Amino acid sequence: MGITLDFGLTIVTSKQSSIWAWQSYPHSEAGLCDKPGDSRIPSSTNGYFTLRPLIISNLAANRETRIHSLAEPCEKRCFIQAYVHKLKRKPCVDETPTGRRLTGISPHKDAEFSRQEAGISKTRGSSAVTSVTSDHSIIYCIENHGNCRNASSEGLKAQNFLGVWRRVTMSIPFDYFYLSRTRLQIVSNCTKYIWCCVHNSERIFQSYENMASKIYDFVVFGAAGFAGYHVALTMAKNCGSHSWAVAGRNIEKLDSILKKISIHTENENVRNIDKIEADCQNIDSLRNMASKAKVLLNCVGPYRFFGEPVVKACIDNGASYVDISGEPIFLERVALLYDELAKNQNCYIISACGFDSIPCEMGVSFVRKNFHGTLNSVEVYHQVSAPNGVTINFGTLKSAIYGVANEHELKDIRKSLSLKNHKSQPKLKPKVPLRGNLFYNPDIKAWCLPFLGADNSVLRRSMTYEYENNDKRPIQTQVYMSFSNVLTCLAFIFFGAVFMVLCKFRFGRYLFENYPQYMTFGLFTKNGPSDLQLKTTTFKTTIMGKGWANRNLKADENLDTEPEDKITCVVKGGELGYVATSAMMVASALTLLDDKEKLPKPGVLTPASAFSETNLVETLNKMGVTFESL
């Protein structure tokens, strides 16, 4: 492998890393390559290694270190190796003079090997291996060029998905490095295959992905639908320098949507946004779409029918995912089936990023942060102001129809989820009693009913997550919807009872699906709300908490005294179903990329579990969904 005057490695290290570096020569030529009098290279050799006496320790995060070759006069077949180390123990590695194959790792017996054929195409970076490692893992990798003449001009590039980059500026036969999550991308057209070994790792996952095609920060799937249009419109207004595209079954409809958005935003560039053809009935099209996105915004519902294939495609292709589902069966089924897979692929799968359940989730998180002590309970009250009436798109009704019809499935899913929990939930005292089905709350001056949406389900999962992962005391929560007069409440109770009964039968579901406007007295239509309704409707969510100020209780600690300290937070926004929901969804997607360093470990997460430590609330405030502590 011929060397040049700038032959070497550039390494970007993480905090407190150490670097061992050495220069290697073929055994028969090692003596010829020594440079007498140069203290940086010892004149003696050890086999076919000439070691650099260089150890750099306790490096700062993202520090870039250049290791140069010191054998320029030789012009022999030499290469440099570097070992970035942050471990309690050091690996022992057997080498070959050519550096083309890994002969063994000794004395550690827990190493595993995987040979991944590259499947080379004309596009550089067309194949790669992803290795998911645990803390203190090491990855060993060899790129084999075979007899390719251009092998020395290109090489192997490693990318840490958590934001720390290590760059190799040459073609190296053998290489060590430590990263917590590593992407190995082949950038040589002639590479035949790469060998990878993940050492000291709890999890090993290796797959092919097309990183060269990850060309969009965001892809809005279902942009031609009613909700998808508003999400795409909001994305066009708030994406900044991020790249994005729209996806759907019909390219002509997507063209029409982009034209409409360009007129609305007075931005002609929107017409040129890329379009991707994708259909939930075509798995290959979903994989193609997911392979091009860093974050996928899924607006195609009902999610019970169409959500799971999209989630799977995202995980398989290393894309993070957000949606606006309010369907507890779908939410908890995805958490049950895909959490471990998402962790292995370093993906964030976050549902309920619309009105279900951002105001509730982030509102409770906001209250918790602003209460100086320990919260025991929280009550959430949703209110809607609609001077020109309320109309909801039919898609929301269809989700509710099949959610009620199949609610029996939820019991089995929750039972399975409870078995996965590593810690049993503590018994909290004093226990907050449930309010009645209809009551008047003088604090908000409204009549209230239990909320039938997904908020309670999502909050329960968030509290479990915080207890298991962050050792925080769970908060007892209840969610209600509130109305200005009791007659509206009674009408809602009557409609809810009829709806719950009819949805249990096929004929009842047929009536609601085919005649939604008549069956719901105009509340649900296939046309959705009018422009006037979108402009004039607003929502207000009041979160009222009780606890013990200046007392920081342990996760399973209780007090005999009743909590007397209170805190109230109010979340306000525009029309809840589409205007505010689209802002919440886009803000969630932006946060996944812009606040990566503040995110928890990947997996299937609730909004609060994912975003409680990020700047999502600040982003929402700028986009018209405001949080205020009273």
Image (cartoon, rainbow, N blue to C red):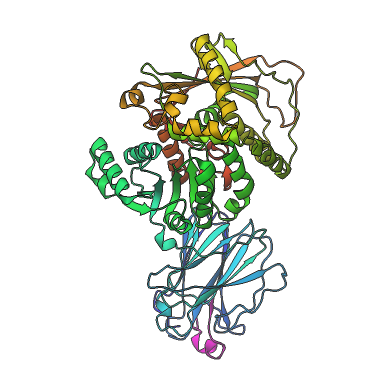
Q: Is residue 254 left or right of residue 473?
A: left
Up the image or down, 210 lies above or below 270; here it is below
In which quarter of the view is residue 196 placed?
bottom right
Q: Specify start and end residues of the magenta stretch as a single range.
A: 21-40
Front-most of 78 and 309? Answer: 309
Residue 304: x and y in percent read: 54, 42
Residue at 26% from the left image edge and 37% from the top image edge: 265
In which quarter of the view is residue 45 placed?
bottom right
Residue 307: x and y in percent read: 51, 45
**Residue 540 can be seen, yes or no:** yes
Residue 244: x and y in percent read: 36, 48
Front-most of 549 and 429? Answer: 429
Residue 98: x and y in percent read: 54, 84
In which quarter of the view is residue 395 placed?
top left
**Residue 326 can be seen, yes or no:** no
Residue 39 magenta-highlighted = yes
Up the image or down, 122 lies above or below 445; here it is below
Q: Is residue 369 left or right of residue 218?
A: right
Residue at 51% from the left image edge and 84% from the top image edge: 34
Residue at 70% from the left image edge and 43% from the top image edge: 416
Up the image or down, 139 lies above or below 294; here it is below
